[in-house]
Amino acid sequence: MQYQSLYRKYRPKNFDEVIGQEHITKTLQNQIMSNKIGHAYLFTGTRGVGKTSIAKIFAKAVNCENNKNGSPCFECETCNRLANETDINIIELDAASNNKVDDIREIREKVKFTPVGAKYKVYIIDEVHMLTDSAFNALLKTLEEPPSYVIFILATTEIHKLPQTILSRCIRFDFRLVSTLELTNHLKHIFDIEGIKYEDEALKLIASAGEGSVRDTLSIADSVVAYSGGNVTKDGVLKILGTTDYDLILSFYDYLINKDAGGILGLIDKMEESGKNLPVFAKDVSKHARNLLVCKTCKDPDKILNLPKEILEKFKEQSTKIEEKKLISFMQIFSGIEAELRYTLSTRLLLETVSLSAIYGDDQVKKN
Ligand SMILES: Nc1ncnc2c1ncn2[C@@H]1O[C@H](COP(=O)(O)OP(=O)(O)OP(=O)(O)O)[C@@H](O)[C@H]1O
Ligand SMILES: [Mg+2]
Ligand SMILES: [Zn+2]
């Protein structure tokens, strides 16, 4: 049998299988159960958090003859028919490749025909921000007076590119980044079904590398499984990711902040021993300075950093312990040695020297 990537294999089929978007799934389920369905929805949020999946579940659920708690039953005649993805009542359009006014006009023509053997015709327009101005105008006309049997679901990762006129006609749902905890549990669940062995720490690392996106998390899991052949360990994951885990960077910064030379040397030693890539580490260290600066100076760091909540909270807390001036100097120091680290033969020595001078920068070093 052909190998199917995890994110394809585990596309949620009903609302209960969706993780991290309860604020959306609950509302949609309630609308379906109470038969108060809107005619234009807008789903927005970053990649791989469930927009298309939920749109498809919703499209099936509104037509299901016997919905279960708002989800499709998969037993009735309509559900069976909709199970084969070519059902004519669910129309998917990828605006990335169909962004012209004529593409939308075609929809407007077809909208006039009533659904066949179902209550609703559902149009799912993905990447809707890619439409041209004239296509938006054409869409607007349809959104203004859609026939009662038509539902539009517009999905986008870039809400700021949509005209106000479209926004104001849709019921908007903001998809969240999924927390590392939820992602970790999701991985656990999938690995258990697949019979893959794992260390708990390894799952956490995969989940935090996914940065809130379920699809990204599952793709990373795919490559990790391919690499480690059924036994997923923390070390294996770190090797594949080639990046440093957040906790390591956070401790490194704690040492920098506390001027703890012994702590820094010990941590570099540990990394060297476990075969970490030191140039990548230097890059992550300078990136972290930037992240802390964002936490410190921006009104809405969540939006800019796009990180899972727990990690962001740790970053925010750490950012209160260090001055902006220091962060800027760390950024310069560590980005400055990144290239050098790639060429020098004594990477460890260079990293140690630079890290210590970063704290010596202003005198006293704590002695352990
Ligand atoms: N909230 C979620 N719960 C469970 N699985 C999810 C969720 N979000 C995404 N996935 C997984 O990721 C895959 C892709 O999700 P989906 O296509 O719904 O994302 P999307 O938000 O539409 O992304 P894009 O912006 O790239 O179109 C799904 O097949 C599923 O495996
Ligand atoms: Mg999508
Ligand atoms: Zn059904």
Image (cartoon, helix red, strand yellow):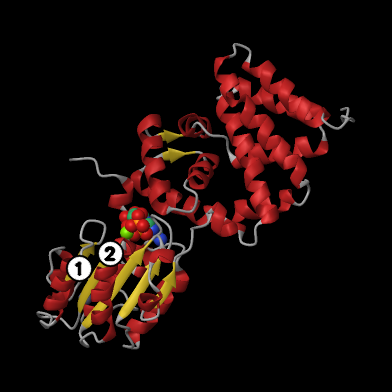
Residue lying farthest to the top in this orientation: 345
On screen, residue 245 versus residue 148, left or right, reads right
Where is 175 relative to 345, above or below? below
Q: Residues within 10 Å of mark 2 (few under 14, many from 20)?
A: some
Tell me if I can see residue 73 in this picture.
no
Q: Earlier in the sequence, mark 2 or mark 1?
A: 1
Q: Residues within 10 Å of mark 1 (few under 14, many from 20)?
A: some
Q: Are marks 2 and 1 in contact (CB under 8 Å)?
A: yes
- Give me the residue at 78% from left, 46% from top: 323
Amino acid type at circle 1 is Val
- Residue in the foreground of this view, choosing between 197 and 38: 38
Amino acid type at circle 2 is Thr
Res 266 → quadrant: top right
Res 55 → quadrant: bottom left
On screen, residue 298 versus residue 322, left or right, reads left
Q: Which mark is residue 165?
A: none
Mark 1: is the Cβ under 8 angstroms from ligand 2? no
Q: Disc 1 marks which residue? A: 101
On screen, residue 36 versus residue 269, left or right, reads left
- Residue in the foreground of this view, choosing between 180 and 300: 300
- Give me the residue at 80% from left, 27% from top: 261
- Tell which quarter ligand 2 is in: bottom left
Q: Disc 2 marks which residue? A: 132
Residue lying farthest to the front in this orientation: 134
Image quarter hosting the C terminus: top right
- Give me the residue at 68% from left, 18% from top: 350
